[in-house]
């Protein structure tokens, strides 16, 4: 149910090869980050690629005004995600029990606090968030897709291997 660690590793390597001075991998997962990153293989992949891991620090969430929002007029967003030179969103395509499908725009929830409070009218609230969290690049990991029992309750028979990775700069187009 998480982004393929080999995809993360390749992205970190490509960013460094393209001249990035530092590549930081960050997410605010539902489960405890240190365990999640270790168990998923992402921590080891980032280390191999010479990137750096950041575990979300609750002191770095700041209340951000969302002027174009219909419902969320402000929300705590990870400050560094709003201030980085380049923000790359690397979601995995997977089934989600609430939204039916979790892709790039839904993945923005990894940069916010109090995510469970978004579950009513989540479609509009995600649209609101996307007006202030604007990735420069979205790389959709659809190499293997969780097709049922997501976001994290799937079993091996729920996984479909497609071998696909897509990228783009328009979050709606990539999700489509």
Image (cartoon, rainbow, N blue to C red):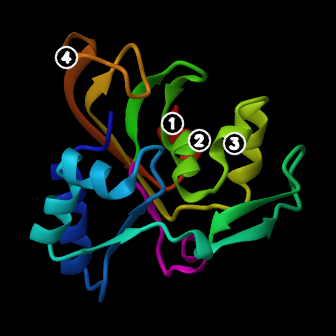
Q: Is residue 27 left or right of residue 66?
A: left
- Residue, far bottom: 21
The percent coordinates of residue 164 (x first, y second) are 24, 34
Q: Residue 144: within the magenta?
A: no
Of labels 4 and 1, earlier in sequence is 4
Disc 4 target residue:
156
Q: CA distance from mark 4 to mark 1?
A: 24 Å
Q: CA distance from mark 3 to mark 4?
A: 29 Å
Q: Nearer the viewer, residue 175 or 77?
A: 77
Q: CA distance from mark 4 to mark 2?
A: 29 Å
* Element on which disc 4 rests: helix
Determine crowd level at label 1: few under 14, some 14-19, many 20+ residues with C-alpha closer than 10 A.
Answer: some
Of labels 4 and 2, earlier in sequence is 4
Residue sitting at 78 percent across and 36 percent down?
A: 124
Disc 1 target residue:
175
Residue sitting at 9 percent across and 68 percent down?
A: 48
Q: Nearer the viewer, mark 3 or mark 1?
A: 3
Residue range highlighted in magenta: 79-90
Q: Mark 3–mark 1 contact, CB under 8 Å?
A: no
Q: CA distance from mark 3 to mark 2?
A: 12 Å
Q: Is residue 114 above or below residue 125?
A: below
């Amino acid at each position: 149910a998480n982004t393929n660690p080999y995809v993360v590793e390749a992205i970190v390597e490509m960013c460094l090869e393209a001249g990035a001075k530092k590549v930081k991998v960050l997410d605010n997962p539902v489960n405890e980050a240190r365990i999640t990153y270790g168990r998923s293989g992402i921590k080891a992949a980032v280390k191999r690629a010479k990137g750096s891991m950041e575990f979300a620090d609750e002191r770095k969430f700041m209340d951000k005004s969302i002027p174009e929002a219909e419902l969320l007029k402000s929300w705590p967003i990870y400050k560094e995600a709003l201030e980085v030179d380049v923000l790359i969103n690397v979601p995995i395509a997977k089934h989600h029990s609430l939204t039916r499908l979790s892709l790039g725009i839904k993945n923005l929830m990894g940069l916010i606090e109090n995510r469970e409070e978004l579950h009513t009218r989540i479609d509009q609230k995600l649209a609101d968030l996307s007006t202030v969290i604007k990735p420069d690049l979205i790389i959709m990991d659809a190499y293997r897709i969780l097709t049922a029992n997501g976001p994290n309750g799937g079993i091996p028979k729920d996984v479909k291997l497609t071998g696909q990775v897509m990228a783009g700069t328009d979050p709606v187009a990539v999700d489509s």
